[in-house]
Amino acid sequence: MEWNIFSRSCPSRTSLAQIANKWTAMIVISLVPGPARFGELHTRIEGISKKVLTDTLRSLERDGMLIRDDGCYALTELGRTLEEPLKALQVWAESHIEDVLDNRDRYDSAADEAILAGIPRAS
Amino acid sequence: MEWNIFSRSCPSRTSLAQIANKWTAMIVISLVPGPARFGELHTRIEGISKKVLTDTLRSLERDGMLIRDDGCYALTELGRTLEEPLKALQVWAESHIEDVLDNRDRYDSAADEAILAGIPRAS
DNA sequence: GATGCTGGTTACGTTGAGGTAACCGAATGC
DNA sequence: GCATTCGGTTACCTCAACGTAACCAGCATC
């Protein structure tokens, strides 16, 4: 079978949606060093609510990326194959953020100037 | 400066949220072979609406990952550094989807059986 | 100058993701 | 027995993401 994320209703797109997700990335990365308890994850991933944490954990458990044993979560073999790609996203985000912040500033101030100059719309 | 996606209000988390996104992934991957026009992207990425496509393109342009030249979009140097990590997500999603689908089936039917057996709740 | 195509924008409605806070059962401590 | 912690669940609400459809300016075509 040819799976293709660009195809409107290919199941692989739902899988992409699951892994291309900041909470998924943070949970998986948090579990790389070893299993962790619910409370530990809740502390490490600052700002995540208990609801979202449980929802995301259940969803990852359903897809077979982690297993739960009485409040203790561990990556499965499948989950471990996500370590490298998701870690790469973390590294990218942290190492290029200054660039990105600069670009945003430039973009926003250019937009402001265009408004002040009375240019009605980009063409 | 120490950027850290796990820190509640670190800007790098907003950057992670932007790149850990299915539309971002599909757009960037679509632009790897070379610049493309709006209509081409709209066709290649099946099921994306014009609104979401324009919104996502503007957002990526703002962050400096692509540039627009009269309806033609091209990755910047920064955007090209995303090629590898995002391509990895596509490959993962497409190559592990059968596994994931099996896991979902197993999880869902186990849940059904638990209900039929009268087990009130997982503990 | 009407018709159509491209690359959008706008207004509007729906859905889903996510936050908050209260609650709860089981285990542990005093 | 009572309070506390842990690992959730539940109800409720908000807001951002997304879809739909109509509209529009610029340009080319005939």
Image: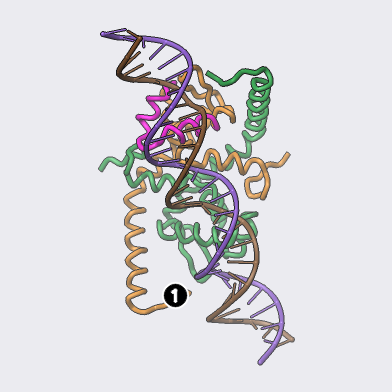
Chain colours: A orange, B green, C purple, D brown
D5 left or right, relative to B39: left
The x, y position of residue D27, in whole percent, is 58, 81
Q: Residues within 10 Å of mark 1 (few under 14, many from 20)?
A: few
Residue A67, compared with residue D30, is above or below; it is above
The x, y position of residue B114, in whole percent, is 64, 20
Residue B11 included in the magenta stretch of the image? no
The x, y position of residue A89, in whole percent, is 44, 41
Identify the residue at horizontal 61%, vertical 41% (top origin): A14
What SS does tag 1 mark? loop
Observer-nearest of A16 and D16 = D16
Q: How many marks?
A: 1
Observer-nearest of B60 and A91 = B60
- Occupied quadrant, residue A106: bottom left
Chain of the residue that carries numbered disc 1 in the rendered image: A
C7 left or right, relative to B98: left
Query: Mark 1 sits on what residue?
Result: A121
- Occupied quadrant, residue B95: top right
- Occupied quadrant, residue A43: top left
Identify the residue at horizontal 36%, vertical 48% (top origin): A96
Identify the residue at horizontal 53%, vertical 29% (top origin): A58
The x, y position of residue B50, in whole percent, is 58, 62
Is residue B32 visible to the viewer in this orientation of the structure? no
Quadrant (top left, top right, bottom left, bottom right) of the N terminus of chain A: top right
Residue A57 included in the magenta stretch of the image? yes
Please state which amino acid type lies under the numbered disc 1. Arg
Residue C28, compared with residue B20, is above or below; it is above
Residue C8, compared with residue C4, is above or below; it is above
Secondary structure mostly seen in magenta is helix
Is residue A11 visible to the viewer in this orientation of the structure? yes
Tell me which segment is drawn in magenta: A35-59
